[in-house]
Amino acid sequence: MMIRHRFVNEIIGVAAGFRDVALNHVYDSATFELIERNASNFPLATRDCRAGGNSHWHAVRSHSTRWHDESHWTFAGDMRHSRSETALAQLGTVAVAEKLETQVFPLDTQFREVVENMRAERIAAIQDHFDRHIALIDGEIWMRASEPCFCLQLDETDIRKVKGLFRKAAAINPALSDHIAKFEDRGFKGQRFRLDDAAIFRESVLDHIDLGWTLDGSDGVVWAVPDVEVLVPESIALEPEAQTVVDIAYTFHELARPKMKHMSCAHLEASCLLLDAFERTRPASDLFDESQISELLDAVRSLAGRDFARSSISVPSLELVADRWENRAIGDFLPLRSHDSAF
């Protein structure tokens, strides 16, 4: 399927009304191909159990993923029920402009002098991105994504509250956009648990209730976490303790960056370690070895004493992250996992 899609081009030159040569970001538009894929090659990997009942598939697909090329794929738009411009806007190739601090010139901006126009390279990169990370399946747009999971969140803002969450699959767009608000899901949102560890996840929440924490996110009768069914067992491969350490390290990395000028040597050393770790690497635990993850945790512990006003990470949360990592099951002690419903 051929589509017309907007993106951000880069031109080195002198834009009309300016005097100096500079790197300019300019909105542009070109024709791309979205390859129509066979649904049989993208089977459902995880599914909200309501999808099999009276609820319509479209009402619960945000909790569902497909499986292809050793990766989850998450729903991103519907070409059948939305204007094509609306559906295609989710693909992320213009969202990169949201992150730029410099001006983005409008389409058809005139230049007095062009030293280098990177339009061809940008178009090639976007087409390659579409080929590898975007799938058009029966009129729906699906994007390559991370693995969904459950999360346990501890909040001490008012009273001690424990909350169970479902963390949706987050789109992976390494080449084009580091910041897509709708699909971006980096940083600490709670303690991760695999979807096939649903029983252990529930027991952990109940353990906190027994310790005096109040359950949040429930109407008192029905648990707020969706009941998710695993249809492709090999699609669940998350190392939850490791990924939770990476999550919290990434959050501290973002909090520390603007305050590095005013840090002590110890805090600065910890911040530089986190900065180096995530400067060119996605916050995914499979990109770090065990010793590196332990170093990330040590850096977080070093920075935990600082007063980060925007941080919602409680002391019990950090303690639980460390305890789960340092006492994680390995080898013959791995838990027996089930793909059956636990809710």
Image (cartoon, rainbow, N blue to C red):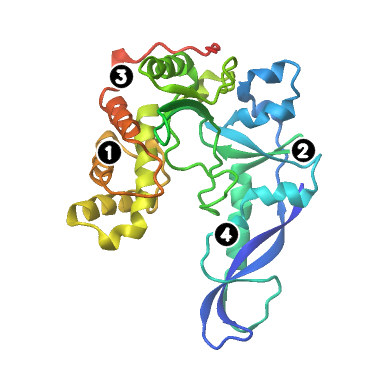
Task: Give the tally of numbered discs.
Answer: 4
Percent across and percent down for residue 72 are: 56, 32
Q: Do the residues bearing badges 2 and 1 touch, measured as CB atoms within 8 Å? A: no
CA gap, disc 2 and disc 1 = 44 Å
Q: Looking at the image, tell me whether mark 2 or mark 4 is earlier in sequence order.
A: 4
Q: Is residue 51 left or right of residue 224?
A: right
CA gap, disc 3 and disc 1 = 18 Å
In the image, 249 versus 158, the foreground residue is 158
- Per the image, the residue denoted by label 4 is 98
- Per the image, the residue denoted by label 2 is 139
Q: Looking at the image, tell me whether mark 2 or mark 1 is earlier in sequence order.
A: 2
The outermost residue toward the left is 265
Label 4 neighbour load within 10 Å: few <14, some 14-19, many 20+: some
Percent across and percent down for residue 195 are: 50, 21
Percent across and percent down for residue 162 are: 44, 25
- Per the image, the residue denoted by label 3 is 329
Q: Looking at the image, tell me whether mark 1 or mark 4 is earlier in sequence order.
A: 4
